[in-house]
C-alpha cells in the first residue's frame, strides 16, 4: 500500500448532517518511537500494548455547508467548554489530511472531546485524542462510501491518526500493535500500525499497566522537539538499529512467553529513550528523583519476590508498572505499600491491555 491508496475517488452517497462518536484508547510503547522523518515517517519501528482505561471520547456533529469553504469550519469543545487554544493543532492536522478526506471543507464540524484521565495528569493525550478524531472522520467517510471494508477503514484511520501524532497510529486496534517497516514482520508499514501478526503466549493476555503519576506538571519537552533532537544525534544510527533488533528478539519472546527477556528489552528501551534525551543537544533529564526511587524499588522487589514486574517510561517522569495477570495481587499490594508514596498526591491510574477503539 502507498499513500495514494488512501486518496478516495468519487463518493457514492450524499449526506447532509449527523453525528459520530468514538472512544479511543492510549497505548504504551514497549519498543519506542523516538525520531522521525518528514511526513510523520518514523525513524525506527515500534510496538505497543493498547491500553483500556486511559481513553479519549470524541464526537463530531457535521452539517453540510451551502458551498465549499476556503478555510476549515469547525468548533472545538474540550470537556464541554469551547477551547480556542486547541484549534491551531487541529487545523494543522486537517491541513495534513485534506488530500485524503476531500469532503472536509464541505461541512461545518462541532468537535466535542473529553479524556477519561485528568487533564493535568502528565499523561499525553495525543495518541488517544488524534486516533479518536481520525476514527470519527473515517466514520463520516464511511457514510459517504458505505462499501468501505473494515480492514481498509482501520488502516486508513491509523494512517490519518499517524499524521496527527505518530503514536496515535497504534491506538486504533489492540492488543499488540506494531508500526514502522521491519523486515522480520510481515505486513509492517511506516504508513500505519498493524496488529502484531505472530503467535503471542497467553502470559501476555490481560497484562497490567499501573501508571504512577510522579510529576503531573506540563511536559518539559514536547514530543515534536524531542523527535527533532534525534537529527544529528551522535548515537542515532545505533539506536535505530537497536530498535529493529529488539523487535526481532521480541518475536521469540512473545511466542515462548519468556518474561525474563521481555523485561530486559522493555526496561532497556525505556532507559535508552531517556539516554537519548540526556545525550542530545540541548540535553534534558526528564526523570525525577522519585522516578529513580521507584525503579530501584521495582528491581529490589523483583529480586526478592520472584515476580516479573517491570517498568517502562514515556517522555516524562511518570512510571508505567507492567505485570502479568497471574501476579496481579502480589504486585498490586507492593505498589500500594511501597510505590504510591512516590507519586504526586499519591495518584496513580490502573490500566491493562485493551482491544482498541469503539464506536459509541
Ligand atoms: C516517547 O507520538 O507523541 O511516547 O508524532 O510528534 O506526535 P508525535 O510524537 P508522539 O511520540 C511518542 C513518543 C514516545 C514513544 C512511543 O510512544 O513510541
Image (tube, rainbow, N blue to C red):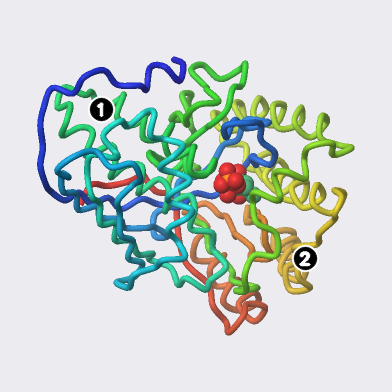
Residue 239: x and y in percent read 79, 35
Q: Residue pushed farthest bottom?
A: 345
Q: In the displayed structure, would residue 285 be above or below residue 141?
A: below
Task: Name the residue rendered at 87%, 49% in the picture.
Answer: 279
Visible in this render: residue 29? no
Residue 250: x and y in percent read 62, 31
Can you tell which mark lies on residue 273?
none
Classify mark 1: helix, strand or loop: helix
Foreground residue among 59 and 103: 103
Contact (Cβ within 8 Å) of mark 2 with mark 1 = no
Q: N-terminal of the two: label 2 or label 1? A: 1
Alpha-carbon span between mark 2 and mark 1: 45 Å
Foreground residue among 287 and 115: 115
| Screen quadrant of the N terminus | top left
Q: Residue at label 1?
A: 150
Q: In the displayed structure, would residue 145 be above or below residue 227?
A: above
Task: Name the residue rendered at 52%, 22% in the picture.
Answer: 188
Task: Name the residue rendered at 68%, 42% in the picture.
Answer: 34
Left or right: 312 in relation to 229: left
Foreground residue among 228 and 174: 228
Task: Name the residue rendered at 31%, 24% in the picture.
Answer: 152
Q: Residue at label 2?
A: 296
Residue 253: x and y in percent read 61, 32
Amino acid at each position: 500500500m502507498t499513500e495514494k491508496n488512501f486518496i478516495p475517488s468519487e463518493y457514492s452517497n450524499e449526506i447532509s448532517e449527523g453525528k459520530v462518536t468514538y472512544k479511543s484508547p492510549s497505548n504504551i510503547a514497549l519498543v519506542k518511537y523516538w525520531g522521525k522523518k518528514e511526513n510523520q515517517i518514523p525513524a525506527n519501528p515500534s510496538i505497543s500494548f493498547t491500553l483500556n482505561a486511559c481513553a479519549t471520547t470524541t464526537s463530531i456533529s457535521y452539517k453540510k455547508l451551502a458551498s465549499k469553504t476556503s478555510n476549515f469550519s469547525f468548533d472545538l469543545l474540550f470537556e464541554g467548554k469551547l477551547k480556542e487554544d486547541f484549534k491551531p493543532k487541529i487545523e494543522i492536522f486537517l491541513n495534513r489530511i485534506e488530500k485524503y478526506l476531500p469532503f472536509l471543507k464541505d461541512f461545518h464540524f462541532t468537535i466535542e472531546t473529553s479524556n477519561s484521565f485528568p487533564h493535568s495528569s502528565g499523561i499525553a493525550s495525543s495518541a488517544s485524542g488524534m486516533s479518536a478524531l481520525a476514527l470519527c472522520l473515517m466514520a463520516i467517510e464511511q457514510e459517504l462510501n458505505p462499501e468501505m471494508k473494515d480492514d481498509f477503514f482501520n488502516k486508513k484511520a491509523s494512517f490519518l491518526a499517524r499524521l496527527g501524532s505518530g503514536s496515535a497510529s497504534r491506538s486504533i486496534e489492540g492488543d499488540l500493535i506494531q508500526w514502522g517497516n521491519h523486515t522480520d514482520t510481515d505486513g509492517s508499514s511506516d504508513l500505519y500500525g498493524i496488529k502484531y501478526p505472530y503467535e503471542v503466549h497467553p502470559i501476555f493476555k490481560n497484562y497490567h499497566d499501573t501508571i504512577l503519576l510522579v510529576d503531573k506538571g506540563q511536559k518539559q519537552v514536547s514530543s515534536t522537539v524531542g523527535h527533532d533532537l534525534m537529527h544529528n544525534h551522535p548515537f542515532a544510527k545505533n539506536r535505530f538499529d537497536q530498535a529493529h533488533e529488539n523487535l526481532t528478539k521480541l518475536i521469540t519472546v512473545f511466542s515462548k512467553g519468556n518474561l525474563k527477556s521481555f523485561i530486559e528489552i522493555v526496561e532497556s528501551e525505556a532507559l535508552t529513550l531517556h539516554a537519548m534525551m540526556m545525550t542530545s543537544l540541548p540535553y534534558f533529564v526528564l526523570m525525577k528523583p522519585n522516578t529513580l526511587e521507584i525503579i530501584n524499588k521495582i528491581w529490589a522487589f523483583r529480586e526478592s519476590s520472584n515476580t516479573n514486574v517491570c517498568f517502562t517510561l514515556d517522555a516524562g517522569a511518570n512510571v508505567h508498572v507492567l505485570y502479568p495477570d497471574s501476579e496481579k495481587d502480589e504486585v498490586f499490594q507492593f505498589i500500594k505499600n511501597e510505590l504510591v508514596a512516590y507519586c504526586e498526591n499519591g495518584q496513580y491510574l490502573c490500566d491493562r491491555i485493551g482491544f482498541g477503539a469503539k464506536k459509541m
